[in-house]
Image (tube, rainbow, N blue to C red):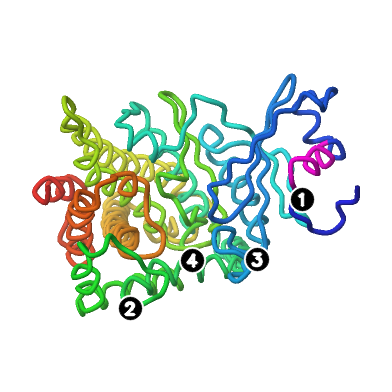
Amino acid sequence: MSFEEFKPLNEKSLVEYIKATPALSSKIGADKYDDLVIKEVGDGNLNFVFIVVGSSGSLVIKQALPYIRCIGESWPMTKERAYFEATTLRKHGALSPDHVPEVYHFDRTMALIGMRYLEPPHTILRKGLVAGIEYPNLADHMADYMAKTLFFTSLLYHDTTEHRRAVTEFCGNVELCRLTEQVVFSDPYRVSTFNRWTSPYLDDDAKAVREDSALKLEIAELKSMFCERAQALIHGDLHTGSVMVTQDSTQVIDPEFSFYGPMGFDIGAYLGNLILAFFAQDGHTTHGNDRKKYKQWILRTIEQTWNLFNKRFIALWDQHKDGPGEAYLADIYNNDEVLKLVQENYMRNLLHDSLGFGAAKMIRRIVGVAHVEDFESIEEDKRRADCERSALEFGKMLLKERRKFKCIGEVVSAIQQQS
């Protein structure tokens, strides 16, 4: 079988592909290809994802299709996104090897990535949050991942020549950026055939979003920042469905939306999804478990994640302040006082950016095209709508008033008051 042109793989052709690719066959000890266990586990939105388990090893194969899988060929989508995903997995993996799965093989023609299989008990973080499971190392690990991947791909570490070269490479991921522009910054604020919500309970709420002038002014500013600000190599879709966890492991997956964009988009997407998880908890209460303790754990995790990120990001900055980074040249920002002022200003702006993007991601998950399991798994419509309305109201407030918050602790207090 020839693999010189693109073709979607099935279980049979996947075995042939592995046989023909030493970087993959060597990982699974596949002398006995008859014993391979292959399972297709794609979430159904964009890609094929196969888990391959052999006699002495395992791996995951991910293949991008030239259209959006859950909609079909009527919505074409470049399979080149696999190139950006593989490149980012390698770049972020080099910077944060403990929290990014290793890439074994990338085939640009086949839009295919072979990578480490995150074996059980790894589970998608979102599923763990729905189930009410605490992850004691989550804040520490995610703060570490975000601090390293964002700092080391920014002008705080790179000179402008290197930075522009890197930005240029990722400008090609335009289709996925345009998809984000549409579903996060545009569709929720207009009538769109793709929008949906828990109707009829949220009909008036969705209409209110479309008619809120103050909200539209804020979302326009964030969209402009998303499109124009090449601050760091961001994951681009860092929600709780893009993180796999155990009690002592945290792994970030699926960076196919990656590009050089605003740091706050990654931080905000992640924190915003934790806030959604918080507001969904009342829909998952059972007799004997009111989820109150778990809600407090989520709030602590939100606060710890930002505070640890802030601390580590500043530590990296201090460590490399005399390095090649050209954002703040050492012979200008040459005393502790001026550097501290710069850092405080930078982190305050980054917090406000993160809160804005996080709010935008919350709103779009309630009245836009793609919803979240946190709410969707609440079976009773009215109960789900009540949880979603609380989250939506908080998201709208956060988007409009984000600049008034001086620290993450104030945000957590506001979440508690809203609930």
The image position of residue 17, as x and y in percent, is: 82, 42
The image position of residue 291, as x and y in percent, is: 19, 32
Distance, label 4 to label 2, CA atoms, is 27 Å
For label 3, the crowd category at 10 Å Cα-Cα, with few meaning under 14, some 14 to 19 and many 20 or more, is: some
Which contiguous range is marked in magenta?
9-18
Distance, label 4 to label 3, CA atoms, is 22 Å
Circles 4 and 3: CB atoms closer than 8 Å: no
Placement of 287 over or under 319, stated as above or below: above
Q: Secondary structure at mark 4?
A: loop
The mark nearer the N terminus, 1 or 3, is: 3
Give the labeled residue for mark 1: 107
Kind of residue at disc 4: Ala
Circles 4 and 2: CB atoms closer than 8 Å: no
Front position among marks 2 and 3:
2
The mark nearer the N terminus, 4 or 3, is: 3
Kind of residue at disc 3: Thr
Q: Is residue 128 magenta?
A: no
Whether residue 46 is visible, yes or no, is yes
Give the labeled residue for mark 2: 190
Q: Secondary structure at mark 3?
A: loop
Give the labeled residue for mark 4: 230
Kind of residue at disc 1: Asp
For label 2, the crowd category at 10 Å Cα-Cα, with few meaning under 14, some 14 to 19 and many 20 or more, is: some
For label 1, the crowd category at 10 Å Cα-Cα, with few meaning under 14, some 14 to 19 and many 20 or more, is: some
